[in-house]
Amino acid sequence: MALYEHVFLARQDLSQAQVDQLAATATEIVENNEGKVTKTETWGLKSLAYKIDRNRKAHFVMLNIEGPSSVVAELERQTRINEDVIRYMTIRVDEHEEGPSVMMRKNERDSKKRREREERN
């Protein structure tokens, strides 16, 4: 089975529950096409480098997928149709990263620095 990382950006005006529902829908699409989602990470609402469809921010979500290429084709087809997703990208990887991704480690590091700063003040 091939390994993929699928990242999508959802509109900024969606609630966290709606973003989680988008991730669940993507997982369902993968599983219905003989694939498997091994990890789902929600990176949160982040600022974009430039406006995309009048959005300055977006909810970032990453899925680690195991499955044939037909899974990716169907997932991208369904994602393209969805109006709540403003960008997506799927890449093939040699192996999935164990533990939290780089983005999650960055969030933890930033929150740790913030807590230390607040304790000093």
Image (cartoon, rainbow, N blue to C red):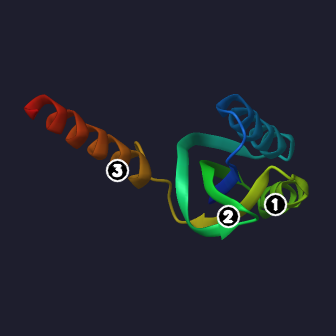
Q: Secondary structure at mark 3?
A: helix
The residue at which mark 2 appears reads as: 90
In primary-sequence order, the first of circles 1 and 3 is 1
Residue 16, image x and y in percent? 65, 33
Disc 3: CA contacts within 10 A as few (<14), some (14-19) or many (>=20): few
Q: Is residue 89 left or right of residue 113?
A: right
Name the residue at the bottom extreme.
50
The residue at which mark 1 appears reads as: 76
Residue 24, image x and y in percent? 74, 35
Q: Are marks 1 and 3 in contact (CB under 8 Å)?
A: no
Q: CA distance from mark 3 to mark 2?
A: 21 Å
Q: Are marks 1 and 2 in contact (CB under 8 Å)?
A: yes
Name the residue at the left extreme.
120
Could you tell me which residue is drawn at 67 percent across and 47 percent down? 12
In which quadrant of the rendered image does the C terminus lie?
top left
Q: Secondary structure at mark 1?
A: helix
The residue at which mark 3 appears reads as: 106
Q: Quadrant of residue 119?
A: top left
Disc 1: CA contacts within 10 A as few (<14), some (14-19) or many (>=20): some
Could you tell me which residue is drawn at 50 percent across and 54 percent down? 96
In which quadrant of the rendered image does the N terminus lie?
bottom right
Tag 1: amino acid: Glu
Q: CA distance from mark 1 to mark 2?
A: 8 Å
Residue 43, image x and y in percent? 52, 45
Q: Quadrant of residue 27?
A: top right
Disc 2: CA contacts within 10 A as few (<14), some (14-19) or many (>=20): some
19 versus 17 height, above or below: below
Using the image as rendered, state which of residue 25 and residue 107 is in the foreground: 107
